[in-house]
Image (tube, rainbow, N blue to C red):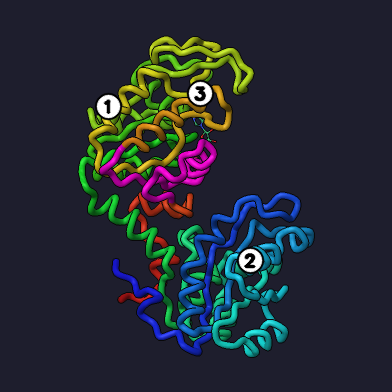
Amino acid sequence: MMKATIKDLDLKGKTVLVRADFNVPLEDGKITNDKRITAALPTIKYIINAGGKVVLFSHLGRVKTEEDLETLSLLPVGNRLSEKLDQDVYFVNTTKGEELESAIEDLKNREVLLVENTRFEDLDGKKESKNDEALGKYWASLGDVFVNDAFGTAHRSHASNVGISEHLPAVSGFLIEKEIDFLGEAVLNPKRPLVAILGGAKVSDKITVIESLLEKADKILIGGGMANTFLRAQGYDTGKSLVEEDKLDLAKSLLEKGKDKLVLPVDVVAAKEFSNDSEHAVRDASEIEADEMALDVGPKTVELFEEVLKDAKTVVWNGPMGVFEMSNFAQGTIKVCESLAKLEDAITIIGGGDSATAAEQLGFEEDFTHISTGGGASLEFLEGKELPGIKALNDK
Ligand code: ADP
Ligand code: MG
C-alpha cells in the first residue's frame, strides 16, 4: 500500500490544503492537551519551508446545535498553533463563502490560514460527515493540492478528507505516513515474537481485531472487561462482572481456534461495586464471588503476562487491563506498562484511544515506540481494514 506523500510534490507557490487532526480536548474554551497540534507541526513546517501557502482544515467535536457553533470554534487552536509556529495563523470563522475565498487568495507563500471547524457544515444536513459531493468539490476548488494528515479521521469518509481527495492531487502528510509505517510494519511484517495485548471494555468492540490478530500474533494476552466473557466461556462463575452473554459462543470458538496462543487472566481484582471506594480483593479466576465484579487483572496474571512479554520483539497493545481510571484498579495496566518500558530491543505500539490515555496519565508516554494518534482509526487498521481517508490518496 504505497501512497504518495508530501515529499512527492513540488509545493512552491502552491496553495496547499491540509486536513489536520485538531480535535483537541477543551474545557471552558481552553485546550487541555495540545498533543494533536504538536503532531501536525512537521507537515505544516515542511510546507512553509518549501514555499507553499498552508490552508488548514479540521473538525472539532460533534456539531449538533447552534450552541456548538460558539463552543466548538477552532479559534483557540489557531492561537495555540500560532505560538508553536512562532508566526501568524490567519483564522477565518467560516467554512465557505467570499470571506474565506478572498482570504485564501490574499495568502502569500509561507503563510498559514486556518478554516473554521469543518463540522459546522453538519448543521446543514451533515454535509461534512456524510461526504456531501458538492462540499468536497467546493473545498478542493480553494487550493492546488491536498495533503491528508488527519489519521484520527482516516477511518471515516468525510468531505474534508475523502471528498477533497477526489478532486485534487492528494497525498499523505508525515503523521499519516508515520502511523502507516508503525502500525503497518507491526502487523504485516513484524519482528517476532509479536505479542498482542487486548483489553478494554467489551469483546464485541474488538471481535475483528482478535480474529485478525489470531492469524498474525504469536501470543495474545487478554485482560480488561473483555477477559470476563472469556473466563465465563471457560466455565468460571464471574459474578457481577461485565460479561456479554451473547458473545459466549464466539469466545468459546476463539478459545478453540487460538488454543495456547490466547493467554487469559488467572486472577483478578474483584470489587463489590463499580467504584474506587468499593471493598475489593484479589481472587483466583475460579473464585470470583456472586456479588463481585472483576475490575482489574491480578498479580499472578501480571507475572504470567510479564513472562510472555520479556521475549517479545513487537508488542501491539489495544485496551487497558482494568478500570485504570480508578486507582484501585489501575495496577494491572501500570504493571503492563512497566514491563513494556523494560523491553530494550522491542517495538512497542499502542493503538487505542483509552489505552493511549492510560499510558499518558500513568506516566509512560515516553516509554513506547509509537502511540497512535487515532483510536478508532488504529483499531480498524489493526483489524486489517483499508481506511477510506488513506485509500482516497494517490498511489506512489
Ligand atoms: P481503547 O479505547 O483503548 O480501545 P476500550 O474503549 O475498549 O479501549 O476500553 C476502555 C475502557 O474499558 C476503560 O474506560 C476501562 O475503564 C474499561 N475497562 C477495563 N477493564 C474493565 C473491567 N474489568 N470492567 C469494566 N470496564 C473495564
Ligand atoms: Mg475507547
Q: Give how far apart the Cα atoms at labels 1 and 3 are.
A: 22 Å
- Viewer-proximal residue among 362 and 94: 362
Q: Is residue 342 visible?
A: yes
Callout 1, which amino acid? Glu
Tell me the residue that label 2 is attached to: 83
Tell me the residue that label 3 is attached to: 295
369 with respect to 261 (left or right): right
Q: Is residue 126 visible?
A: no
Q: Secondary structure at mark 3?
A: strand
Q: Give how far apart the Cα atoms at labels 2 and 1 are.
A: 46 Å
Q: Using the rendered view, name the quadrant where residue 209 is placed.
A: top left
| The magenta segment | 343-371
What percent of the width, then of the height, locates residue 199? 42, 34
Is ligand 1 less than 8 Å from the beta carbon at label 3? yes
Q: Secondary structure at mark 1?
A: helix
Callout 2, which amino acid? Glu
Queried whether the magenta region covers residue 342, the answer comes back as: no
